[in-house]
Image (spheres, rainbow, N blue to C red):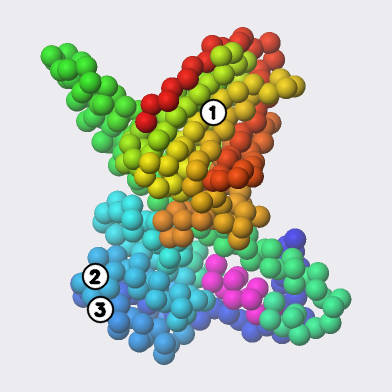
């Protein structure tokens, strides 16, 4: 892959003109907010203003721009809707969304549809805005430079084909890093809010334990808290990965049956669970694993939820655990849905590859693969006559004790 020095050399040899315009467009329906933003930005950037999405799109078609900073909650057009339109009109411009709310649908839309570079929550500080704009502008310059180089190199002979391929790979890496950076920023704020809520929920759980509350209600509260706790852990895992590009494993002797039962319990929180025929079966005797149980539960939960969303009401979803020859354990999730489209099978375990369109981030199976491989295992999509079957194969713990399994056909 080409480094910064090699790219700089190509820029000089090819005579690529500077790609930075210095233009920043501020969009907010509150004039006072525009005045405040302009006050500390106009010394560094060429600032333009708009009080609505339509006005911003008109300005973006006339002036040189690097970055658009838009408020999310505007009456005519939200910030995410504006950036989605802007992707078509000005795909070379980076977008930043400002919001005062932990809005998960807007969060996913900002990543999937609008390709927002950052999603900043209010109240913000001037240095935070300046840093975000400068990073976005740097990214725009680098992306424009690479795209210009690709365009020029495409006109050269076959001897330059290798350079084009390398630049394309680096461009794709930049897009992945951009989206991972956005996800990391977002998950940090959401995790903080969920942890604050957990404090209140734990207090409620303690009150329930000391009061005369029926057992079924206690169980519902317990399952709900377990689900929220798993969500917090999953978001923290995603945040850590977006920052470091790696996972830290907390390895211990782990019962495969416990992984399955925990994953099924958490999956019960999905509204689709009760409308599917869900069953799970664990072999009578299974060797234990040397594993991070919480992260393996995340993997199985992701596979179960994918199966739930890929099937129709009354169709079957099965979760299985069995021993394999050679000292391995298999955790499998299969369904009777339509199967995985051929167009996405080849890149199914790659980052941001999703069969759900704008409804998913396309990171679930990618992260599942990374977690499984860190456990020295493998994850595969297996062909079957109907539906899909995902298999996670893991090495048994050296000298691990055999575990008694169970079977449940409950829906």
- Residue 202 picture quarter: top left
The answer to whether mark 3 and mark 1 are in CB contact below 8 A is no
In this image, 358 relative to 327: left or right? left
Q: Which residue is mark 2?
A: 74
Does residue 161 appear anywhere in the picture?
Answer: yes
Span colored in magenta: 139-149
Note whether residue 243 is visible: no
Q: CA distance from mark 1 to mark 2?
A: 48 Å
Q: Provide the secondary structure element on which disc 2 rests.
A: loop
Magenta-span inclusion, residue 142: yes
Q: Nearer the viewer, mark 3 or mark 1?
A: 1
According to the image, label 1 marks what residue? 320
How many numbered discs, if any?
Answer: 3
Which residue is found at the position 53% from the left and 60% from the top?
178
Residue occupying image coordinates x 50% and y 76%? 91
Q: Which residue is mark 3?
A: 51
Nearer the observer, disc 1 or disc 2? 1
135 inside magenta stretch: no
**Label 2 vs 3, first from the N-terminus:** 3
Question: Left or right of 327: which side holds 188?
Answer: left
Image quadrant where one finds the N terminus: bottom right
Q: Give the quarter of the figure containing the C terminus.
A: top left
| First in residue order: circle 1 vs circle 2 | 2
Q: Extreme bottom residue here? A: 62
Q: Residues within 10 Å of mark 2 (few under 14, many from 20)?
A: some
**Which residue is outermost to the left?**
212
**x, y percent for residue 236:** 44, 39
Percent coordinates x, y for residue 131 in the rendering: 44, 61
């Amino acid at each position: 892959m080409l480094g910064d020095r090699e790219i700089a050399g190509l820029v000089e040899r090819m005579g690529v003109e500077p790609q930075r315009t210095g233009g920043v467009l501020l969009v907010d329906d509150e004039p006072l907010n525009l005045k405040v933003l302009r006050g500390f930005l106009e010394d560094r950037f060429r600032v333009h203003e708009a009080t609505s999405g339509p006005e911003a799109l008109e300005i973006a078609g006339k002036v040189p721009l690097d970055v658009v900073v838009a408020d999310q909650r505007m009456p005519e057009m939200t910030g995410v809707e504006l950036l989605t339109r802007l992707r078509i009109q000005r795909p070379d411009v980076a977008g930043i969304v400002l919001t005062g709310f932990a809005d998960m649908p807007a969060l996913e839309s900002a990543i999937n549809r609008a390709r927002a570079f950052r999603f900043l929550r209010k109240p913000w500080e001037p240095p935070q805005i300046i840093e975000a704009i400068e990073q976005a502008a740097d990214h725009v310059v680098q992306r424009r430079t690479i795209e210009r180089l690709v365009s020029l190199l495409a006109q050269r002979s076959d001897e330059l084909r290798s350079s084009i391929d390398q630049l394309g790979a680096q461009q794709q890496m930049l897009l992945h890093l951009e989206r991972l950076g956005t996800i990391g920023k977002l998950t940090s704020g959401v995790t903080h809010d969920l942890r604050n809520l957990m404090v209140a929920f734990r207090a409620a759980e303690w009150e329930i334990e000391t009061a005369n509350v029926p057992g079924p209600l206690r169980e519902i509260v317990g399952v709900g808290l377990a689900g929220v706790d798993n969500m917090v852990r999953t978001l923290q895992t995603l945040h850590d990965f977006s920052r470091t590009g790696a996972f830290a494993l907390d390895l211990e002797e782990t019962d495969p049956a416990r992984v399955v039962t925990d994953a099924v319990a958490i999956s019960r929180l999905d509204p689709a669970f009760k409308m599917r025929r869900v069953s799970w079966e664990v072999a009578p005797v299974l060797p234990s694993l040397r594993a991070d149980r919480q992260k393996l539960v995340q993997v199985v939960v992701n596979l179960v939820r994918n199966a739930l969303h890929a099937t129709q009401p009354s169709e079957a979803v099965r979760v299985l655990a069995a021993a394999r020859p050679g000292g391995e354990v298999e955790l499998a999730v299969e369904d009777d849905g339509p199967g995985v489209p051929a167009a996405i099978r080849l890149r199914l375990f790659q980052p941001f590859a999703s069969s759900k369109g704008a409804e998913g981030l396309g990171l679930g199976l990618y992260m599942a693969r990374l977690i499984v491989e860190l456990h020295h295992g493998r994850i595969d999509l297996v062909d079957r006559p109907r539906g899909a079957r995902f298999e996670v194969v893991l090495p048994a713990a050296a000298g691990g004790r055999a575990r008694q399994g169970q079977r449940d056909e409950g829906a």
